[in-house]
Amino acid sequence: MSSNQPYIPNLLERVRHESSLDLLGIADVHQARREFLELTPAVSEKFSLAIVVGVRVSPTVLGALVDGPNLLYYHHYRQLNFQLDRGAARMAQEIERMGYAALPIPASQIVDWTTMRGHVAHKEVAYLAGLGWRGRNNLLITEQWGAQVRLASVLTNLPLEPARPLSAGCGSCRRCLSACPAGAIREEPGDFDHQACYQQLKEFSKVRRIGQYVCGLCVKACHGPVGVEGDR
Ligand code: B12
Ligand code: SF4
Ligand code: SF4
């Protein structure tokens, strides 16, 4: 197996490119794996690393949002989830062909509806992989595209070098605060009002003929290049 190691990053990079994904990062998930849902310890403990992939949300589609989600945004959101899921599945397949274990985690699947959690929180994995920071809007913010990225992860035991979290932040930017119709976004990322956001998304899903909990206004407001503790 060791003779394969120099080729591993090339392989991942090739799959990223062929799947038309914009971001790829490696995270150490030793600590985070305690929080994984629906995976028994025997399964979780196989994985000390996660590969996180990301795709940019179209600024043109976001530009067509006015005061909440529309059907075009909903369609785009679904297409990006398919793209991420296909890319993650493809990456897992290639890793398994090399004799290692790999578990693709869905881009957007809720496992526990009471706590509203997926198997793995992609934002946290992306943060651990150094792809961005936790923004005031509670999203993963990248330097290139702000919050305008969607994410998926692949848990693996492939021997790779994980990255470290960035020491960057929103700086003096406050753009998303006034964009949120629910007033859920506060000065401190830790004060984000999950309930207010959820109630707003529930309302949108009924009145906008969408039937899904999407919104997009705090994503539209947060475009890059952003933050890094300076004025914008
Ligand atoms: C359930 C869910 C929701 C629920 C809310 C659940 C929640 N607790 O936030 C609802 C339906 C309300 C929702 C709304 C939205 N969602 Co959502 N959602 C998910 C889903 C499926 C699971 C999230 C989860 O498991 N959370 C678990 C809890 C514990 O984590 P948390 O609350 O996010 O964060 C806590 C800890 O992780 C900790 N933390 C520790 N380290 C870090 C590091 C970072 C960077 C962050 C942010 C937090 C964090 O802080 C929090 C403590 O309370 C994920 C997909 C996935 N599997 O990750 C997408 C996901 C988080 N959603 C996403 C998006 C974009 C949205 C919406 C904009 C809807 C839309 N598409 O239009 C809004 C934004 C709301 C907001 N501003 O936060 C993206 C985020 C992309 C990004 N750039 O960050 C994800 C990753 C989907 C994807 N495939 O890209 N979502
Ligand atoms: S998804 Fe909508 S309601 Fe929720 S925080 Fe973002 S702008 Fe506010
Ligand atoms: S819009 Fe500005 S304040 Fe809000 S999350 Fe993005 S960088 Fe941070």
Image (cartoon, rainbow, N blue to C red):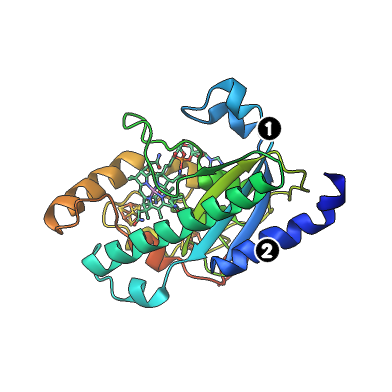
37 or 187, nearer to the observer: 37
Query: How many numbered circles are shown?
Result: 2
Residue 51: percent from left, percent from top: 63, 49
149 or 159, nearer to the observer: 159
Examine the rendering and report whether any part of residue 178 can be seen: no
Residue depicted at 59% across the width and 48% down the height: 92
Ranked by sequence position, the earlier of labels 1 and 2 is: 2
Residue depicted at 54% across the width and 29% down the height: 35
Residue 135: percent from left, percent from top: 51, 54
> Label 2: which residue?
13
Left or right of 178, for residue 229: right
Disc marking residue 30: 1
Examine the rendering and report whether any part of residue 66 can be seen: yes
- Quadrant location, the N terminus: top right
Disc marking residue 163: none
127 or 20, nearer to the observer: 20
71 or 42, nearer to the observer: 42
88 above or below 178? above
Mark 1 within 8 Å of ligand 1, using the beta carbon: no
Find residue 8 and report its image quarter. bottom right
Residue depicted at 65% across the width and 38% down the height: 101
Residue 173: percent from left, percent from top: 51, 64
Amino acid type of the residue that numbered disc 1 sits on in the rendered structure: His
Spatial CA distance of label 1 from label 2 is 24 Å
Residue depicted at 44% across the width and 42% down the height: 191
